[in-house]
Amino acid sequence: MAKKGKNKEARLKAPKMSKTADRYALYLQSVQAPDVDAAFFSKVYKKEFGQPAKTLREDFCGTFAVCCEWAKRGDDMVAYGVDLDPEPLAWGATHNLLPLSEAQKARVHTLEADVRAANTPKVDVLAAQNFSYCIFKTRQELARYFKVAHDSLADKGVFVLDLFGGYESIEDNKEETTEHDGFDYIWEQHKYDPINAYGTYKIHFRFPDGSQMKNAFVYDWRLWTIPEVREVLHEVGFGQVDVYWEGTDPKTQEGSGRYYKALQADCDPAWTCYIVGVKGA
Ligand SMILES: C[S@@+](CC[C@H](N)C(=O)[O-])C[C@H]1O[C@@H](n2cnc3c(N)ncnc32)[C@H](O)[C@@H]1O
């Protein structure tokens, strides 16, 4: 039996959990729900056009987890993931793509490219998730990207964006911690400037040994409002633009995780929503 002193020594020598943890795996576990996203995109397309969507382009795809879920949904489901960073693409190839069947793998394609320049076949659904398009900080830049999205859709298609907001989302120097299996997820609202609506947001992870992975992901965004996004979508040619607002669970009075088309909403201190541009409605 090892002596107590030796155990302590071994503990001290063991690498800190923050040094060995995989930030992409933690992100997937704490931020993403790719199966829920893929199901929502399918539902929205079917609702608009009465037929199932077959092709998806996932912009800012990172580890293209949604593409992989999409390919699993049926034998004729094809997905294209676009990201300019080779690192998450490589991680996704090993961790998200590899477990798929050969047939599913053959229907997932990735492009290391800028979303504004990526050339993909026209798709039924184009998705830009986790607020990634907020890197575009002027109306002109946003419109340029939305125009590319419009042109990349088939004659009938939906462009699905998400957005967050509410007065709590612009409080800076604020952290919110969520517990997960084996780690804590920390969302930091670092800084928000009301004059230009630029915000810096950070993700950190904390581990049971007390160590922290600081700044695992850092985002410099313009926090667009729903009316701004809707107006720009209309300007680039989307004839119909809908907002899907989160329903309320009657038991908890918290968000239900299910989103419905809405024209009006109560003043929620911290909300997320989907904004859907419909082409060919
Ligand atoms: C917030 S992550 C989103 C990851 C994933 N889509 C999700 O929903 O969680 C943003 C990703 O966008 C990529 N990115 C940033 N600017 C880009 C651009 N102009 N074109 C393509 N990808 C870009 C980054 O490399 C990063 O992987």
Image: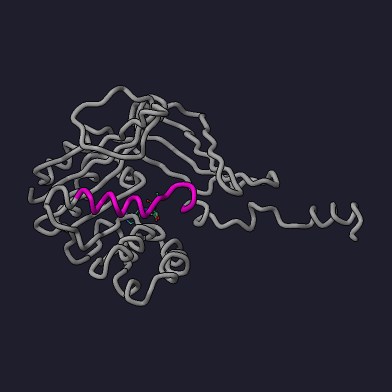
Q: Quadrant of residue 205?
A: top right
Q: Is residue 29 magenta?
A: yes
Q: Is residue 48 above or below residue 249?
A: below
The residue located at (21%, 32%) in the rendering is 262
Name the residue nearer the viewer: 219 or 160. 160
Q: Which residues make up the magenta segment?
A: 28-44
- In the rendered view, does 70 fall on the left or right side of 85? left
Q: Is residue 82 visible?
A: no
Quarter of the picture containing the N terminus is bottom right
Image quadrant where residue 233 sits? top left
Q: Position of residue 207 (x, y in %)?
A: 64, 46
In the image: residue 62, left or right of residue 127: right
Please say whether residue 155 is visible from this viewpoint: yes
Q: Taking 82 as reference, is 131 above or below it?
A: above
Place of residue 4 in the rendered image (x, y in percent of width and height, measured from the top left):
90, 52
Q: In the rendered image of this protein, does residue 242 appear above or below residue 62?
A: above
Whether the magenta-drawn stretch holds residue 72 is answered as no
Residue at 11% across, 52% down: 49
Measured as percent of width and height from the top left, residue 105 is found at 35, 72
**What is the magenta segment's predominant secondary structure?**
helix
Query: Which residue occupies the extreme bottom position in the image?
Result: 102
